[in-house]
Image (spheres, rainbow, N blue to C red):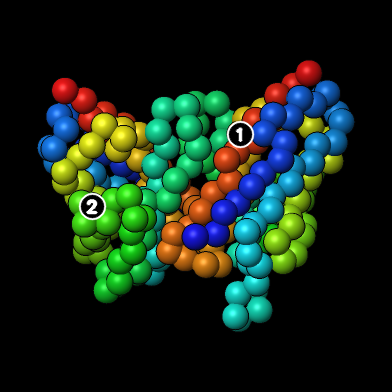
Amino acid sequence: DVVMTQSPLSLPVTLGQPASISCRSSQSLVHSNGHTYLNWFQQRPGQSPRRLIYMVSNRDSGVPDRFSGSGSGTDFTLKISRVEAEDVGVYYCMQSTHWPPYTFGQGTKLEIK
Amino acid sequence: EVQLVESGGGLVQPGGSLRLSCAASGFSFSSFWMHWVRQAPGEGLVWVSHITSDGSSTYYADSVKGRFTISRDNAKNTLYLQMNSLRPDDTAVYYCARDFYTPGDVWGQGTTVTVSS
């Protein structure tokens, strides 16, 4: 199984400042079809998860453009250009290249300083 | 509006069974792969099972293989998860999720399963 490792696990950020979350996979996430299936989810307190980014860098509909995804191979990053209060929650990366199983990272808890 | 609504959770004794349902609306249910994902109290997200759009193929996490069965009724726009031989470590919120390019473009609100004597 592919192991997804996120860092940091806790991320205190000042409002208006940038934030960055790293996600590393135990093997390359490049599929034989050439695509890379690395996805990012946000889970606000008390809510269901929401997909923010799919296939490394594609923002889902309605996701603010302050969220961006990048990376390749085994190293990926979610960036928030300017953190807002509504961004508080837990962020998960998830790989859907080598399945089953689909595997999530441990989660990164973003809080406001 | 695209929507997924889970139901069927509850309190069950170890060794018991439950069937979860996920009612889909606002989209062509029969065109999409679907997943179940669970989250134990205070823990992260864990993928449980996946079914293809026509129901012909199913996949499971090792932790539930042989105990859980995913199925769907495309005529009723409903996804199911039959859970047998439940264990305390199956206690979690269970979410259904749609797959568009990759899993999870749409999620339900979740249904809580508690396995305890």
Question: Who is closer to the viewer here, B10 or A71?
Answer: A71
Q: Is residue A82 above or below residue B104?
A: above
Q: CA distance from mark 1 to mark 2?
A: 28 Å
Question: Who is closer to the viewer here, A87 or A10?
Answer: A10
Please state the chain letter of the residue tagged with numbered disc 2 in the rendered image.
B
Q: Is residue A38 above or below residue B22?
A: below
**Quadrant of the rendering where the C terminus of chain B is positioned:** top left
Q: Is residue A56 visible?
A: yes
Q: Residue at x 42, y 51 (%)?
A: B47
Q: Which three-letter amino acid code belongs to the residue tagged 1?
A: Val
Left or right: where A100 falls relative to A91 = left
Q: Residue at x 83, y 23 (%)?
A: A14
Q: Which three-letter amino acid code belongs to the residue tagged 2?
A: Phe
Q: Is residue A88 above or below residue B18?
A: above
Q: Residue at x 41, y 27 (%)?
A: B41
Which circle, 1 or 2, is nearer the viewer? 2
Q: Picture coordinates of residue A11 (x, y %)?
A: 74, 29
Q: Residue at x 20, y 46 (%)?
A: B83
The residue that label 2 is drawn on is B68
Query: Which image quadrant for residue B49?
Result: bottom left
Q: Picture coordinates of residue B112 (x, y %)?
A: 31, 31
Residue A24 is labelled as none
Q: Is residue B28 visible?
A: no
The residue that label 1 is drawn on is A90
